[in-house]
Amino acid sequence: QQQQQQQQQQQVGSPQKQQFIIPLHEPFAGTLRQNEIRPNSSLEVRIEECLRPGDVVLAKVHANGERDFVLTTAEAELGVIRATCESSGAEMRAVSWKEMRCPASGAREGRKVAKPRQR
């Protein structure tokens, strides 16, 4: 019986390991530190090449800070999910894990793009 319970738990997944995405319906304050964007990168991360003001970012709460939450986008599934082109104002589309393209102007801008989620 214990083996059966373990097998069921492995199939369903442990509740402690399940991740939930909770949409926020009001502004949320958080800090995304430079070293929490791509912590395993061997190159220096330039924030302006990863995200910009106005981007919608899928991030995970990493820790409680003194005044707000410390966020991370260190996983492939985390990062920019919506961005607006600076030149045309159109919504950009991801072309790779590190770049988005404007369909109106063709402009390309660097971003830390979130890996598309399975629905």
Image (cartoon, rainbow, N blue to C red):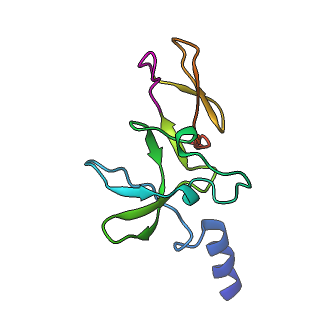
The picture places residue 31, in percent across and down from the top left corner, at 41, 58
Instruction: Say if residue 1 shows up in the picture.
Output: no
Quadrant into which the C terminus falls: top right
Residue visible at 32% across and 55% down in the picture: 29
In the image as oriented, which residue stretches furthest toward the bottom?
A: 2
Quadrant of the frame with the N terminus: bottom right
Residue 67 lies left or right of residue 61; in this view the side is left
Let me know if residue 100 is in the magenta part: no
Where in the figure is residue 57, as x and y percent of width and height? Answer: 46, 44
Taking the image as drawn, is residue 99 in sight? yes
Q: Which residue is drawn at 38% across and 36% down?
A: 54
The quarter of the displayed image where residue 103 is located: top right
Q: Which residue is drawn at 33% across and 64% down?
A: 68
Q: Given the current orientation, which residue lies at the most extreme top position?
A: 104
Front in this rendered view, residue 60 or 68: 68
Name the quadrant containing residue 69: bottom left
**Region of the chain picked out in magenta, as a range:** 83-90
Task: Determine which quarter of the picture holds residue 116.
Answer: top right
Q: Position of residue 70 (x, y in %)?
A: 43, 64
